Amino acid sequence: MHFLSFAKGALAMFWLVALFNLVYPSGEPQQRPLLLAAGAILLVHVGEAALFNRKLKTRPYPWLERLQVLLFGFLHLRGLR
């Protein structure tokens, strides 16, 4: 379970860097690849949230679960049992 916590922390840091890059754009060599990676990861996580929507509806707080899937993707779904 320690790996999942580490991976979630790393992904949270990635989202913070991507958000910081939107607010304060960095130079051209770093900005575009970071935004493309963030967009691709967000698209994949939206697909995961749509795919596992039925399972997420049964949870006590489904909107919180969906938000965590959007942020952490399969790492959050793996923690659900």
Image (cartoon, rainbow, N blue to C red):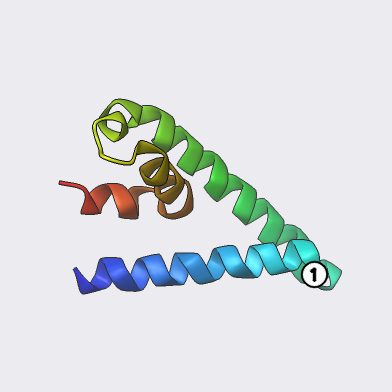
Q: Which of the two residues, 7 or 36, is positioned nearer the viewer here?
A: 7
| In the image: residue 22, left or right of residue 45 | right
Q: Which of the two residues, 35 or 15, is positioned nearer the viewer here?
A: 15
Residue at the front extreme of this rendering: 60
Q: Which residue is depicted at the point 82% across and 68% down?
A: 25
Q: Which residue is depicted at the point 45% across and 46% down?
A: 67
Question: Crowdedness of circle 1 by 10 Å Cα count: few (<14), some, many (20+)?
Answer: few
Please state the total of marks drawn on the protein image.
1
| In the image: residue 34, left or right of residue 25 | left
Q: Which of the two residues, 61 or 36, is positioned nearer the viewer here?
A: 61
Name the residue carrying label 1: 29
Secondary structure at badge 1 equals: helix
Residue at the top extreme of this rendering: 54
| In the image: residue 72, left or right of residue 35 | left
Q: Amino acid at mark 1?
A: Pro
Look at the picture and state if 28 lies above or below 49: below
Q: Quadrant of the N terminus?
A: bottom left
Residue 27 placement (x, y as % from top left): 84, 73
Q: Which residue is depicted at the point 32% across and 32% down?
A: 52
Residue 4 placement (x, y as % from top left): 28, 65
